[in-house]
Image (cartoon, rainbow, N blue to C red):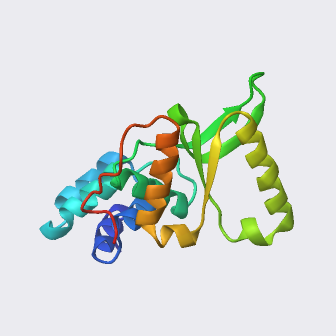
Amino acid sequence: MTSAARTFCDLARDLSVPELVAVADRLATPHPELAEAVAAFPDHRLRAKLIEAARLRDIASESPKESELRALVRLAGLPAPRCQVVVTDDSGRFVARVDLAFERYAEVLEYQGDHHRTDVHQWRRDRTREAALESLGFHVTEITQADLDQPRQLVERVAANLRRRGWGGSPCYSPWFPG
């Protein structure tokens, strides 16, 4: 039997960095324990990959696909979005809690699993929520698995939205970026 941290390390043979980030985000393992497991991992060829995945870890993420999305954005050199951001209106009333937000640019990324499409009540709530966010000046980009399957196109679209909102950069892909 191995520890969760060691299992994370063992998965580096088969998973991409975004997938490893999704695993790391779910671990209850404290960061120092994860760092120790990475440092002690015997396969030196995988150590840099593990260090990168551990660096991108954010336990505030609430789903593996949100974690993968955040990792793709970071591996492409885009600004760091915050996870699970609470958005309120000018009166301080709750409007939404969003998956990922580039607060400086009022840009929101929402991962939409299939139930957001197939459950009519969820679909309607999503439309109302998106309209409320947009009325506050946010731009909402919905992301699906089809987008994650084409990571460069996804990142280019997110980068274009950020540039329209004042970001002056462009993607700068890490060697760990998939594809």
Percent position of residue 5, x then y:
34, 61
**Which of 141 and 24 lies nearest the eye of the viewer?**
141
**Which of 167 and 35 lies nearest the eye of the viewer?**
167
* Residue situated furthest bottom in the rendering: 14
Rendered residue at 47%/34% (across/down): 166
Rendered residue at 48%/73% (across/down): 149
Rendered residue at 46%/53% (across/down): 70
**Which of 141 and 17 lies nearest the eye of the viewer?**
141
Rendered residue at 71%/41% (across/down): 134
Q: Is residue 28 visible?
A: no
Query: Taking 66 as reference, is 156 left or right?
Result: left
User: Please, is residue 48 above or below residue 7 in the view?
Assistant: above
* Residue situated furthest top in the rendering: 91
- Total marks in image: 0
| Quadrant of the rendering where the N terminus is positioned | bottom left
Percent position of residue 103, x then y:
54, 35
Percent position of residue 165, x then y:
52, 37
User: Please, is residue 13 above or below residue 134 in the view?
Assistant: below
Residue 124's image quarter? bottom right
| Quadrant of the rendering where the C terminus is positioned | bottom left
Percent position of residue 11, x then y:
33, 73
Residue 6's image quarter? bottom left
